[in-house]
């Protein structure tokens, strides 16, 4: 696995190239922290972008969905897709309306998504998808049965061509605006897990398992 991601004309960052990188470890860190991937592709009847759960398995990104899904079933022969994962770190409030921005860490990846049909690989993907959300959860729930495995489509895309972009720090107003009498700065934002809420339909009041009680984002 190369330490640097592939960079082509398509993945060359145009604006603020100083915020960009092609460092695989940086991409992995963002992908491992994120929870939602926005997946875009051409359906043949227009372009669609859908939010999806995902997981990283080494240099592979796996996605899954209902086999009955009209667009997922169209991946039988593979399809070029783009995946974007964004971590929003803050709102950047500048003196001028023009210079407002956001602090973020994002990855945009390109590749060919192919169906995973082998049962063993599907199982590995299911495990990774669940443990990406809540580490340890796979071992603490009923495993999928034959019907559920068949009802689920798994897609895999190699993480080969991708770019990373990160903005951090205070606003960057133009020099002529620096003396304006407006508050400027950053409102930090972070995704935070609350305390686990038990399903009222659980037959007995059982304690929240330790791996959930200590769950953080
Ligand atoms: C939360 C958030 C909000 C944003 N809001 C805006 C907005 O309102 N308006 C706006 O113009 N821009 C916004 N951006 C920045 C936007 O994502 C692009 O970076 C920007 O539009 C211009 O980049 P570019 O000229 O390099 O794009 P392009 O030339 O269109 O892109 C070239 C290549 O650069 C790479 N790239 C571009 N952007 C990113 C990225 N964010 N992360 C990783 N790789 C990237 C991709 O590989 C892409 O194919 C936002 C980014 C984030 C994360």
Image: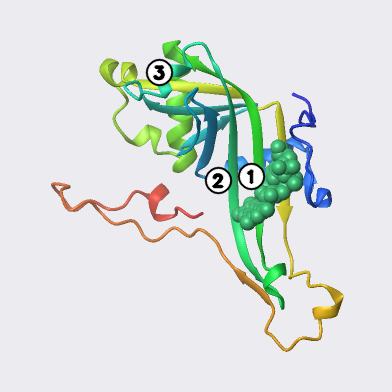
Q: Can you tell which mark lies on residue 34?
A: 2
Asked whether the residues under the numbered discs 3 and 2 touch, taking CB atoms below 8 Å apart as contact, a structural biologist would say no
Q: Is residue 30 left or right of residue 119?
A: right
Which mark is nearer the camera, 1 or 3?
3
> What residue is shown with label 3?
73
Q: Position of residue 31 (x, y in %)?
A: 60, 40
Quarter assignment of residue 177? bottom right
Q: Which of the marked residues, 1 or 3, is nearer the chain's N terminus? A: 1
Q: Give the percent coordinates (x, y) of residue 162.
A: 70, 33
**Residue shown at the point (73%, 89%) measured from the top left:** 181
Secondary structure of the residue carrying tag 3 is helix
Looking at the rendered structure, the secondary structure element under dot 2 is loop
- Name above or below for residue 122 compared with residue 90: above
Q: In this figure, which colouring scheme has been used for the structure?
A: rainbow
- Identify the secondary structure beneath mark 1: helix
In the displayed image of the protein, which residue is found farthest to the left?
203
Q: Is mark 2 within 8 Å of ligand 1?
A: no
Left or right: 164 in relation to 152: right
> Spatial distance from mark 2 to mark 1, Cα to Cα?
6 Å
Whether the residues at callouts 2 and 1 have beta carbons within 8 Å, the answer is yes
Q: Which is nearer the N-term, disc 3 or disc 2? A: 2
Q: Residue at x 55, y 61 (%)?
A: 190
Residue 7 in view (yes/no): yes
Residue in the image at 58% along x and 23% along y: 157
- The residue indicated by pointer 1 is 30
- The answer to whether residue 26 of the structure is visible from this angle is no
Residue reaching furthest to the right: 175
- Are there few (<14), some (14-19), or many (20+) residues within 10 Å of tag 2? many
Image: 107 above or below 79: below
Quadrant containing the N terminus is: top right
Structural distance between the alpha carbons of marks 1 and 3: 29 Å
Closest to the observer, 196 or 170: 170
């Amino acid at each position: 696995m190369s330490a640097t991601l592939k960079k082509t004309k398509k993945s060359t960052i145009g604006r603020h190239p100083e915020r960009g990188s092609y460092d695989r470890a940086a991409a992995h860190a963002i992908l491992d922290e994120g929870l939602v991937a926005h997946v875009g592709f051409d359906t043949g009847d227009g372009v669609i972008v859908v939010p999806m759960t995902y997981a990283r398995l080494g240099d592979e990104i796996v996605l899954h969905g209902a086999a009955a899904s009209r667009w997922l079933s169209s991946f039988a022969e593979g399809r070029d897709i783009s995946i974007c994962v964004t971590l929003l770190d803050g709102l950047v409030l500048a003196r001028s309306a023009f210079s407002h921005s956001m602090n973020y860490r994002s990855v945009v990846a390109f590749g060919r998504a192919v169906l995973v049909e082998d049962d063993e690989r599907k199982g590995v993907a299911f495990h990774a998808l669940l443990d990406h959300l809540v580490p340890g959860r796979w071992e603490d729930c009923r495993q999928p049965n034959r019907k559920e495995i068949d009802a689920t489509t798994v897609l895999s895309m190699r993480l080969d061509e991708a770019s990373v972009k990160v903005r951090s720090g205070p606003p960057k107003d133009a020099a002529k605006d620096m003396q304006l009498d407006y508050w400027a700065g950053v409102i930090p934002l972070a995704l935070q897990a609350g305390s686990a809420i038990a399903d009222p339909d659980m037959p007995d009041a059982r304690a929240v398992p330790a791996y959930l009680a200590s769950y953080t984002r």
